[in-house]
Amino acid sequence: GAGVSQTPSNKVTEKGKYVELRCDPISGHTALYWYRQSLGQGPEFLIYFQGTGAADDSGLPNDRFFAVRPEGSVSTLKIQRTERGDSAVYLCASSGGGEQFFGPGTRLTVL
Amino acid sequence: QKEVEQNSGPLSVPEGAIASLNCTYSDRGSQSFFWYRQYSGKSPELIMFIYSNGDKEDGRFTAQLNKASQYVSLLIRDSQPSDSATYLCAVGGSQGNLIFGKGTKLSVKP
């Protein structure tokens, strides 16, 4: 595809449930980033992949959050035992070595 | 803790005027600077990047960087109502991640 795609666009879940958010980067982009954006805030960095490996996961808030990118393309952000405070828009961005381009985001609502 | 500060606004300008958006950052070693535009309910869209001191122009947009003052700005000439959005300033981190400010909401009045 021409841009970064993310699925689902919206996810509503109940507190304590497990969710997976998917990101499909721009073809050929080796760098992939996950961010989280709460209302009225700028995006907050979560994790960065270079190829298949997580180069920097210092932004993950706790061990309920985990992300993978097994083949160096599509990435999945996994959140265990969701909490109401996890509600936010989860953004994925990819880069070919310079500027980052964002996908449309997944709006996660934890009830 | 690396920080990026922006005035949250709203900044209101009349159509046709110059809108001036400002940003300061805390890490003196920062090398890359970006401006993203974000319409309500949409994801950030890259509009400008700048790596060197001075001005960089692209159409109606000019980015200005002053590393000594740790200051970066975005000027929008001939502002249009379609420019009404939140403008996010971002600074490149050591691993390539972006550190964002909270954004400045711009309103261009017809």
Image: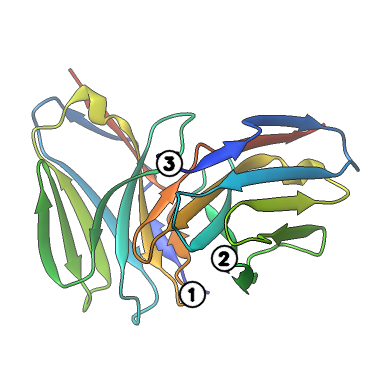
- The chain containing the residue under callout 3 comes to A
Q: Is residue A49 above or below residue B61?
A: below
Disc 2, SS: strand
- Residue carrying label 2: A48
- Residue carrying label 1: B95
Q: Position of residue A93 (x, y in %)?
A: 49, 52
Q: Position of residue B30 (x, y in %)?
A: 35, 76
Q: Is residue B35 left or right of residue A56?
A: left
Q: Is residue B99 above or below residue A83?
A: below
Q: Is residue A59 left or right of residue B21?
A: right
- Mark 2 or 3: in front is 3
Q: Amino acid at mark 1?
A: Gln
- The chain containing the residue under callout 2 comes to A
Between marks 2 and 3, how big is the CA–CA gap? 18 Å
- Point 10% across, 41% down: residue: B60
- Residue carrying label 3: A3
